[in-house]
Amino acid sequence: MNFILDHYNYWIVVFLMMTGFYIVITANNLVKKIVGLNVFQTSVFILYISEAKVSGGTAPIVTEGATLYSNPLPHVLILTAIVVGVAVTAVGLALIVRIKRAYGTVEENEFKKMDDAI
Amino acid sequence: MLEQHLAALPILLPLIAAPIALILGRSSFSWAFATLISACACLFAWQLLDLALANGVISYEVGGWPPPWGIELRVDAANAFVLLAVSALSTLVLLYSKDSIEKEIEASKHTLYYTAHLLCFAGLSGILLTGDAFNLFVFLEISSLATYTMVSLASDRRSLIAAFRYLVMGTIGATFILIGVGLLYMSTGTLNMLDLANRIDIAESGRTINTGLAFIMVGVSIKLALFPLHMWLPSAYTYAPSAVTAFLASTATKVAVYVMIRFIFTVFGVDHVFGSMGMDLILMALAIVAIFKCSYKATVQSDVKTVLAYSSVAQIGYMILGISLVSATGLMAGLIHIFNHALMKGALFMAVGAVFYRVGSVDITAFRGLGKQMPLTMAAFTIAGLSIIGVPLTVGFVSKWYLVTAALEQNQWIVAALVLGGSLLAVIYIGRILEAAYFQERPDSQNTTEIKEVPWLMLAPMWALVLANIYFGVDTSLTTEAASSAAEWLFQNNEMPLGNQAEAK
Amino acid sequence: MNLWQGIEPSQLISLSILLPFVGALLVIATGKSPNLREAVTLITAIVLFTVVLAIYDYISQGGEIGLELIELFPGLSISFEVEPLGVLFALVASFLWIVTSVYAIGYMRGHNELNQTRFFCCFALAISSVMAICFSGNLLTLFIFYEVLTLSTYPLVTHAGNDAAKKGGRIYLGILLSTSIAFLLFAVMATYSLTGTLDFRAGGIFDDSHNKIVLSVLLVLFCYGIGKAAIMPFHRWLPAAMVAPTPVSALLHAVAVVKAGVFSILKVMIYIFGLDELKDLATTDIMLYIGVATILLSSCIAMTKDNLKARLAYSTVSQLSYIVVGALLASSIASAGAALHIATHAVGKITLFFCAGAIMVASHKKNISEMVGLGRQMPITMAAFAIGAISIIGLPPMAGTWSKWYLTIGALEADKLIVVAALMISSLLNIAYLLPIPVKAFFNTTTGEAEPWSWSETREAPLPMLIALSVTSLCCLVLFFYPQPLIDLVNMIPGVSTQGEG
Amino acid sequence: MSDFIDLVLLAMLALTGLRIIFLKDLFAVVMLFGIYSFLTALIFINLDAVDVAFTEAAVGAGISSVLMLGTLALTGREEKESSHSSILPLIVVFITGAALIYGTLDMEPFGNPDNPIHKHVAPRYIEDSPKEIGLPNMVTSVLASYRGFDTLGEVVVVFAALIAVLSLLGVPKEGQEKAPASGLKSHQVLRVVAKLIISPIILFALYVQFHGDFGPGGGFQAGVIAAAALILYALVFGLPNAVAVIGPRFLKFMAAAGVLLYASVGFFSMYKGGNFLDYNKLAADPVAGQHYGILIIELGVGITVFAVMLNIYYAFGNQVERSNIQ
């Protein structure tokens, strides 16, 4: 029981990740693919932040009377990763806009038919 | 002063040059600037390799913080060697781009192209030199974003789809790496690669670490287009502008191969990955399937760029095969092939780009009769093609030689035979193109008088690579020395101290 | 040869390789003026021959020449070393290059071929790589120039540029390149990983410590990897290469290229395996009988061919296997016969090809059935053809006698009666497919059937061609009466002797 | 208590994720994603990661959602039925998930202060950074100083995204005639409220920018918030009006300048004899040097992020306007 209590957080995060991953590979609509990618990445962020948590600790900002702080390093990494995520999202969406203009659709199976896929 | 910062300069120069190139605005200014910067970086890479061969490891603490608290740049023979190939290719491709890009990308986007190229180069250098697992992820994303941009710059609408697929696959790969790094960090508390290697404790948290290993390997495999995760590569290479393909084919996947080498040998340790996890067998099987499946696919394509793209996947198979042989010779063969394949594919894609420049198509039918009309381009294509096949006195032969030697050393006779068998397929797919170029007549419908040699600025870098193909095929001392000492370093790296950790404590 | 006395012997090797190479460059440079270009070719050929003679001189006095060029891999360099077998081959090739150049000038002009500069250039390159093969000091060097030879002759094979030439070229390159990469390179590297060296050594580099089964496999790989030796079933490239202009067929596909193949086999057998080791291998006999089968089968195929060049091509396939068989008999006499056969078959077969080319230029006839009665109009050509044919068959007083003699003795000594029988039958077959041609040309003028063509317009071929074919047919005679220099040379090969083992 | 909140939030996340899979209405999908981000931000707060929560809320729920909605306006909001089977993806996902679960089996208990992750590198950040850097917010210390190179990389990633979007979509031309349809002219209330609210937002951005050393915040969050202010302006008053205030060309320069400003700190410290980004060398007193360094690089981050986010919005907005006109 203790084992479950100690790990349930990670397991739910794994579930969330896989939800995002599933959306990425199955979505036919490109926008939804990008949403899936974001869900996937966001869940990974939760994994990192969960690692950083210290029970009974506080946010890693020096405060009077606090002795236990949570680990600041994963926070830093995830700050960076969030930014990377939004950058990729912006590029992906820009590509989608162009694809819509060039093909008239953003459904994968539709434009696959238009060009001979390799 | 330069000496002190030598390890950081190949990253910083292009990184800073990118925004400046954007500000410069005019196409020719930013071209000249980017080329100059890339050439400087190449020079520094050369010095770095020299230094690394003489002194072993060079450690540079960014921000003055000792590792593992700060980020460390760590240069040894292995990454300096790959960096030299990447920076040299970047310079040559930039020289080549000027005319090629004018034809394939609309004028208003030239500056953006050069900026993206510099960013990509900076990202690749960063991936190579960094000694920090998370920093690697950041640079990976820089280079990836720049790559997606460059692929999508082509005027063919299919390039958009190719770029989007590449983006989705690439991001999945990067996220996998992120997960893997997270798991490693979780069980060790550090991000520095060398520190990770020291602190990985299989007995204590083996399952977490092995999962991290698996995720990193899968993520890197997507980036390096290891069969069967290569699906993004052929379309991206086919529809990207020619100069971009030449650059990517000769650098991006190679850098990813290096990352794989780095994680296997430096972080996890060869005994664990190959010994107890048995990953050598998986890699070897995938590599061999890649060699044959993709070489075969290359023989049935009609678009020459696709042919070469599939050939790239097959050639990556050779590199991975070298790694999977678990010996210093095998690793060395892989490293040499990274360098050599960059030379061959760079020249080949440049030649194909030259054909596109004049003929406007890269279908195999467009190559008909070009042997007469574009003799220099096709001669370059021929020599580089022979190199891919592995004809003696070219670099391809050197790679194949070491690979087969390594296989025989391990008594893997069948693998050795398969390697040589794979080159027979290369004979077919290169032969088809050469035959079209030299022995088929140009269809009358096209105005043949218009097709002439490309400008010298495209020919010069192409021929520089071709000559390098021959030079390094005959005088193998530089490549052999660098690759073998790199391989030795990687095999015995565990004894190396971690930066200046001792003094810091 | 006083001409080269001042030069360091080891430089003679580089000179012999560089000369044709420089010649090739000069040919390109002088391509605009045909006279100059051909003069360059001829002069280069003559100078090369004197260089080879100088090497011969030096070697026959017991000198040793070696040259290490570049270290390609650690411990493995491109290196050259002169030994008697190589000198023999080099002498033959460089001498016949002079003759062929004379011939080619007549042929190419008489035939109004296009791209003559490319032709002469590639020709010189091919000779350059042949020289390198002759003097190669280790297997790696041999392999490298073997490939260079394949590639540099490819443009010559496809010279005509029509569909047939392309098809022929594809088969040529396909078979030679694939066998060399898949089998030969593999065998070379396996040898390296087994012994740690690739140097040619007297008595071979394998010894009893190596696994016999592995060596047996290697033997097969070497035999088939050297596709230029045209052992069945990898012989298809040779007839396919006959689409090339006749001088190419003559020098390259009767002499240089195919001989480079059998030369490599001899060299591997003598200097890598060692004749003693060879005797103990299980596959030696298998390959031997495949060689015998090749001799007989290709002779039979030759009989069915009406195209003169095709018939000669299959005859070449058959004759090459003589040499392979000679090498695989693993007896010193048979090896001597095999080495001699390189020279004697070369002069004989080149004469026949010269004649075929002369007939084609003069009368545009390619098929044997159309050559009836030709002897009247082209007596010199057909006489030379007869001499060449007799030499190939192995009848005195022609050069071919000697090599066949030693081969037969070797086979007897090795107690391989089947081989002896095969040699005899093959000689009969040779008679059957070669002799009728001159016989019909001279004597069979009244067949009764009305001939759809008339010979009234046909004259002898241009003078350069006549000179060339006279010279080579003369050689056939001369080598019968004065074989001693060649025999001496052959006897200098370690472990090989015309006197037998004792 | 905190664990319970955590569990509830995670459950809500799982539900949201599952709903996204099955919804075909993309507008709802994007909205759900916004919710997903917000819930994540809440979890982050609950896990003591305030800086990250701040960023996630601004980026995931803010910028990302806005960009997605902009894209939807161009591509349509219905996902069509897909034909390919979903068994193979399910297997792939299942295997990946199983591998991860397998990996968790050896993990240390959640939140345990003795986990190796808290033992090796982190203690120095927590114990020494207030002395070495002199800032109470350890996240800022690590972000800007210890791992300043990562952050430079992050800024370059943002810059690379700008290059990508510019090359794909281009930017609106400056000084073009005002399109009649743009903006929300009829909503007077909105216009008034917007006018009132925009300047406080910018003020708040400045506060976040410079207060990041002490509390949650920093250049990145500030940049996003400032960009949000102008995006609001563009939404209410029309894109051409916003372009007239700050033009895309100027933003391009700003983006480049931010990166260069960041890097110049590094080069200056190289000039002073230290390594790249070694702030200790910037002033006689190392701690003061750290202060200057962090201040300037945070400014660089803020400038670049603001310029890039706004410019990307311009690029998308421009596409939407063009399609509206058509």
Image (cartoon, coloured by chain):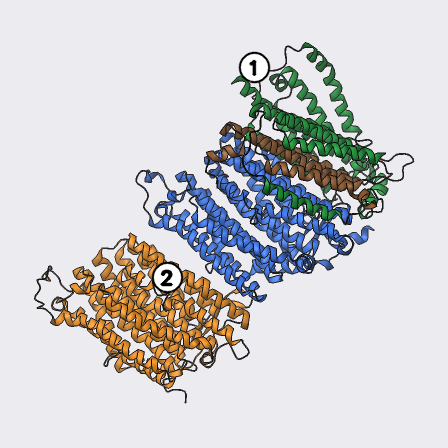
C115 to the left or right of B186: left
The percent position of residue B131, horizontal first and vertical second, equals 70, 49
Give whichever of A70, B453 is nearer the camera. A70
Task: Tell me the shade of chain C.
Answer: orange
Amino acid tagged 2: Leu
Residue found farthest to the right: A65
Task: Decide: is A107 above or below D274.
Answer: above
Task: Decide: is D40 above or below B458.
Answer: above
- Label 2 sits on residue: C125
Task: Tell me the shade of chain B.
Answer: blue
Quarter of the image for residue C295 reads: bottom left
**Element class at badge 2:** helix
Whether residues under marks 1 and 2 lie with C-beta atoms below 8 angstroms apart, the answer is: no
**Element class at badge 1:** loop
Task: Tell me the shade of chain A.
Answer: brown
- Chain letter, disc 2 residue: C
Task: Decide: is A78 above or below C18.
Answer: above
Chain corresponding to green in the figure: D
Give whichever of C101, B161 is nearer the camera. B161
User: Which residue is located at x 34 percent, y 63 percent?
Assistant: C236
Amino acid tagged 1: Ala
- Label 1 sits on residue: D179
